[in-house]
Amino acid sequence: MRSALLKLFRNRKFSNYYLGSFAVLFLAAFFAKPLFGQATGEVAHSGGEHAFKYFSLFSDPKYTSLEIYSLIAVLGVAVLGLIYAAMLAIQVKAADQGTKRMQDIAAAVREGADAYMTAQRGKIVPLIAIITLVLYFTTQSEEGAFKLGRAGAFLVGSFFSWLVGFVGMRLATMGNLRVAAAARSSYGEAMQLGYRTGTVTGMLTDGLGLLGGTLIFIAYGEQAYEALLGFGFGGTLLALFMRVGGGIYTKAADVGADLVGKIEKNIPEDDPRNAATIADNVGDNVGDCAGMAADIFESYEVTIVAAMILGLASFGHKGVIFPLLVRGIGVLGSIISTYTVKAGPNDNSDSALKSVHNGFWIGSIISVVGFIALGISYLKFDAAYLLNNPMAKAGFPNGDPTQLPVWATFGIANADMRPVITCFIGVVLAIALNKVTSYFTHTTHAPVKSLAKACQTGHATNIIQGFAVGYESTVATVVVIAGAILLSYLCYMGTPPLFVAYGVAMTGIGMLTLTGNTISMDVFGPVADNANGIGEMGYDPEEMEKNEKGSYKKARQILSDLDAVGNTTKAETKGIAIGSAVIAAVSLFASFIAVIAVGSEDKISQMTTEQYLAEAGKLTVAHPMVFIGFLLGGAVPFLFSSMLIRAVGRAAFLIVKECRIQFRDAEIWAGTKKPDYGRVVDICTKTAQKELVGPAFLAILTPIAVGFLLGTQALGGFLAGMILTGQLLAVFMANAGGAWDNAKKFIEDGNYGGKGSEAHKAAVTGDTVGDPLKDTAGPAVNPLIKVMNMVSLITLGVVMKYTVIDDKLPTQSRAIGLVIGLVCLVVIGWAVLQSKRESKELQEMEKQFES
Amino acid sequence: MKPYLYLSLIPESLIASHLSPEEFGNYLSVGSQKRSRGQAIYFKLSDAYTEATLKKLGMNADLGRSVGEPPRRSAYLNIYRVLEQTPLEALESIHLTTDDGRVLTLKPGAYQQDLAPRFHLYQEFCPVSPRIISTLEPKAFAQEITDSTKPISLPALVFTELKLEAMAEDPEAKAQNLPYTSLEHMRDCMRELKAKPSKKMKTVVRNFHQDLLYRTLRGGFFVATTGNGFRYFPMPSREELESTFYPWWRSALSSFGG
């Protein structure tokens, strides 16, 4: 029976067909029900006092016409963002594609990336289908619309997240060729094409994130919480898959290619004779484009989900609509500012980087001015509003908005500009995190220089110094993030914690206002990197020199400069990704407490401040269960990182072996025969897919196991511990890795002996150690933090009913909880063991190598 | 099959081969099975000298290979005092091979003396291989080292000059892009030469046993023989390296895991 089932599910055609049909039907139901199933939605709530209606805000007198039009306008802006993305994609596609040789190389990279995405889709789809069903059946509401809403929104969130990653990667594999082709004639054109390739992904993230959140709110109104959680969870889970799979792929290929190519054979990077070269370029796309885009998309979703949930519970519907409007302004700001990023034919790295930064500044200014204008016109809390939304009174001194200090009202009667201020704090936080990351990882600053200096005394001192720099950077980042949270707290000092949490959530909204710009900057990195690779492998120096003297050198210089700009912009955005994960997690933590306080997620809007405070007060480390949870939560990011780093090492080992075998072919070595690039791409794809499963189970099942076995307080402690160590570890790994990488570049630029010196050898070691940290484990911790938060929040309702440790529950319920918890533990144990074991396929490969 | 005669500098040896200079360089650096790697520097000797030498040794152009057999990759003819027995005019070209087998060919060129007072760092290859710091410019250094009237001299020498950047003018100057392991010792040697102007050269490294970083070459390769024999093989300009000889230059720059 078991083998028959396994056979059935391993049959790709079968699973793809049925799972695809299932997804389509489910999505059809999710979209059709709000449009045609109004009557079925009108089932009374358990309390009997409310009846749910789709699109109720259109008939609810609480919402003004202006608010409804504004929401529709936000939808329009989201669509505009998507149209802008499509327009740029057409522009990029229409650009010159270079010579046939260049096109062949780009096609090989694209094929590899597609193969990876297809293989990943096969692995993820069944899991998504199962989770969709689990969500449908476990949603703690008797209302069918909510069950369908959460599960359907989960499916939509997953799909959007995957789409952002897929399109981002596809565009990058298209843009790299065009950039390499354009570099033969103009710096400005090449730079613009690269940046615009990134902007397509950025605007897709903006557009889809805003579209999803707004549509859900329009359809579900004040009950949007249910669907929003599903939407956020879907995006987050997919981002985890993209990040983990992409991270393993990119570094396994990179480390493998470097170990054989650069260290063993002393051949340059991207040398076409190296069989791992194409996989390395594919890795840049699946890791840095697909992974990062999905990661930021989930942050974008989760912050809006947190802000909307908390906004509803604190300030009522204005608290929900405001973040959506802010996001709309952000999208407009991104459209305008990304379009201003341009470079001339004679520009260089510095001026190009300045243009990218100017774009960010322009976007920030547009956004901040927009926030203020929006706040002045919309954030007015008059007596009529407070009458309809009485919970909002707690957010004002003595329940009266007129008693707010002048800084909070800007002198406008009944206005509350604190959400605007917290958004502004978010924008500043994004800039500050950019600066902190830049300080610790850029060659012009002391930390990287100190690493380069340490290289003079050997490999060990470089590693030691790298640890010191990485640790120090975590402190700086924590101080910046804590400072932002503190400022948000000060804005809402004296109000209940839910309002403070709303302020923090708005900081997250502000921080990701310019997501379009952030992703443009990030994706530009791998596009330029790939373009450089295509130039290396695909340019014909003799032909180019024949046509125009010096053109080859010039084109190579342009690509090299663009690569340098891309490395910088890519590094800068990593800080934002990590920071946004923490801010989103902190906001979600307040929702977590709120659900425990009221006992079920569908009653969150009925919560009182007293209930919230009472529950929050129980979460103290003086309580053993909280402390136990805290310890366990703190350990999970380490186990997760260890699984990923080990996975990279294992995959790289196989790649090295494969490349060595191919190098023995005299024709390959002589450059007269093309290596079998596909074989290395295959190894990377298989390994990345295999290694995806363990960390995913760890992320999803650990909070469930803790919740069922140790209770909600332990789960609260677990989340706190996980957020703390996860954030510290992510920043440490990203910055230490970045600093090691740039220390190597600093030496290669002619310092401390330059290339080939002893210091350089030490720097190469540091860079190799830092690679899996900064590009695999570090970035994957961001979605881990959010997935664990979302899973905790989503399962909380069920957990509270079946907690083993709660002696007030019936024995039968506790027994169910015990079974679920133990099953989770067994699966986690299996996943950890699996992550240490080599799969059959890999063992077969090894046998082939040995023979 | 046409026979070639090569004078390899690492180690000093006379080798006959059917491989052309490019093929021979690739073979020397990575072997036939691609399981090894290593830098190679060698001279191609003129066809006339090749013919005469093979004749003298009683060898045919087939180097012992019958028809249908694969070409002879290497037949070692001599491994002792090869350079001093080879006439200067027979040194047709010098070939610099990178670790992964890319070959750059240097032809002899005219030498312009540079008499500005400064330090010079020389790497000797054959028959001995110390690294020397000297106040003599290359031609004067060549004459000095091959002057048989001096207590220490060589009958012939192949050497190259290495970059010193600002240290060429001032031993105390900053050296950011010099990958030499014995930089401080080198400064001591320069200080000593500065303090004793009568002393013209000092050994920095007694025996060179590492790959040569081609990016540190300054000018080119020199061959000196007793009786003021001197031949110069200039390196292409940086611009030429980055365009015409780019594959070789990229490979040269990637040495040591770059």
Image (cartoon, rainbow, N blue to C red):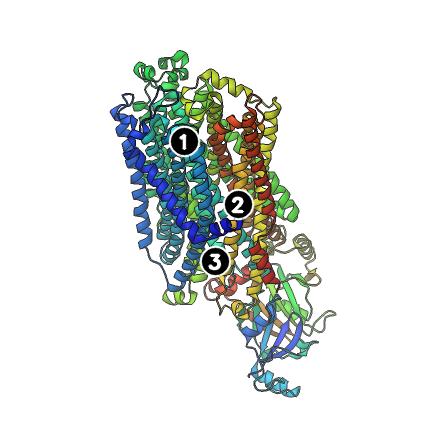
Q: Residues within 10 Å of mark 2 (few under 14, many from 20)?
A: many
Assign a secondary structure to mark 2.
helix
Q: Is residue A377 left or right of residue A820?
A: left
Where is mark 2, residue-wise?
Answer: A693
Q: CA distance from mark 2 to mark 3?
A: 25 Å
Q: Position of residue A154 (x, y in %)?
A: 41, 37
Q: Are marks 2 and 1 in contact (CB under 8 Å)?
A: no
Q: Chain of mark 1?
A: A
The residue at the far right in this view is B151
Where is mark 1, residue-wise?
Answer: A305
Q: Is residue A596 above or below residue A343?
A: above
Amino acid type, callout 3: Ile
Where is mark 3, residue-wise?
Answer: A278
Q: Nearer the viewer, mark 2 or mark 3?
A: 2
Q: Residues within 10 Å of mark 1 (few under 14, many from 20)?
A: many
Amino acid type, callout 2: Val
Q: Is residue A612 above or below residue A779?
A: above
Q: Is residue A423 visible?
A: no
Q: Position of residue A740 (x, y in %)?
A: 57, 46
Of callouts 2 and 1, which one flags the residue occurring earlier in the amino acid sequence? 1
Q: Position of residue A793 (x, y in %)?
A: 48, 30
Q: CA distance from mark 3 to mark 1?
A: 39 Å
The residue at the far top in this view is A398
Q: Are marks 2 and 3 on the same chain?
A: yes
Image quadrant containing the C terminus of chain A: bottom right
